[in-house]
């Protein structure tokens, strides 16, 4: 099987890689580019653990082919912090103990950032609705929702 040459912008950096036609974007990120933050939870788009932004749209990377990233922009959890400075969402997840095993955390963070970029002052109901595509077996969601609300408040104050 021949590999395809793909050029994309990943976390703000021009990136080139080779991938099989049938290889998912998740597999490309993890196996070819060694960006292992996005996790494989279900491979059917049901859990949100592999969430990334593709051209500004929240997607499950297990449902996107790697070749589909050609000429596009992909933002992963690895691009969320600015060097050693964590994004407010990352800090509030840590401070509020909104994570346990960590499998779902990257997906929740990417999805929450997408929400806050569109809705800087979301209600609890809006947060719960927006994050409904992300599943967690450990935390019970309340700490996650609180962390998103706290980060949103901080980010509004910083603007």
Image (spheres, rainbow, N blue to C red):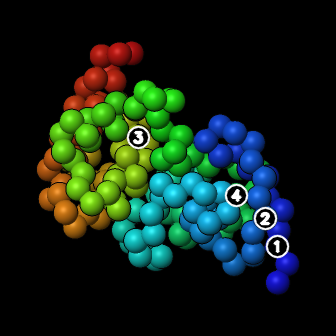
**Image-based side of 41 in relation to 36, left or right:** left
Position above or below: 135 against 80: below
> Mark 1 and mark 2: span between their CA atoms?
6 Å
Answer whether residue 116 is visible to the viewer in this image. yes
SS of the residue under disc 1? strand
Q: Which residue is mark 2?
A: 18
SS of the residue under disc 3? helix
Mark 1 touching mark 2, by CB under 8 A? yes
Q: Which residue is mark 4?
A: 69
Which label sits on residue 102? none
Q: Residues within 10 Å of mark 2 (few under 14, many from 20)?
A: some
Which label sits on residue 3? 1
Tell me what residue is drawn at x 40 percent, y 71 percent: 41
Asked which quadrant contains residue 67, the reply is bottom right
Q: Residues within 10 Å of mark 4 (few under 14, many from 20)?
A: some
Question: Which mark lies nearer to you, 4 or 2?
Answer: 2
> Mark 4 and mark 3: span between their CA atoms?
21 Å
Q: Residues within 10 Å of mark 3 (few under 14, many from 20)?
A: many
Q: Which residue is mark 3?
A: 113
Q: Between residues 109 and 97, which one lies in front from this camera angle?
A: 97
Question: Which mark lies nearer to you, 1 or 3?
Answer: 1
Q: Which of the marked residues, 1 or 2, is nearer the chain's N terminus? A: 1
SS of the residue under disc 4? helix
> Mark 1 and mark 3: span between their CA atoms?
33 Å
Q: Which of the marked residues, 4 or 3, is nearer the chain's N terminus? A: 4
**Image-based side of 57 in relation to 3, left or right:** left
Tell me what residue is drawn at x 54 percent, y 40 percent: 79
Tell me what residue is drawn at x 23 percent, y 56 percent: 100
Asked which quadrant contains residue 126, the reply is top left
> Mark 4 and mark 1: span between their CA atoms?
14 Å
> Mark 3 and mark 2: span between their CA atoms?
29 Å
């Amino acid at each position: 099987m021949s590999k395809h040459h793909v050029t994309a912008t990943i976390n703000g950096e021009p990136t080139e890689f080779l991938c099989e036609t049938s290889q998912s974007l998740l597999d490309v990120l993890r196996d070819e580019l060694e960006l292992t933050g996005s996790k494989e939870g279900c491979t059917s788009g049901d859990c949100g653990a592999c969430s990334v932004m593709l051209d500004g749209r929240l997607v499950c990377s297990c449902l996107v082919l790697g070749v589909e990233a050609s000429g596009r922009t992909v933002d992963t959890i690895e691009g969320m912090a600015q060097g050693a400075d964590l994004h407010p969402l990352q800090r509030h997840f840590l401070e509020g103990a909104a994570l346990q095993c960590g499998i779902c955390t990257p997906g929740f963070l990417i999805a929450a950032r997408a929400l806050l970029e569109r809705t800087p002052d979301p209600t609890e109901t809006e947060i719960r609705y927006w994050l409904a595509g992300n599943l967690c077996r450990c935390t019970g969601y309340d700490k996650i929702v609180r962390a998103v609300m706290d980060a949103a408040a901080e980010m509004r104050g910083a603007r």
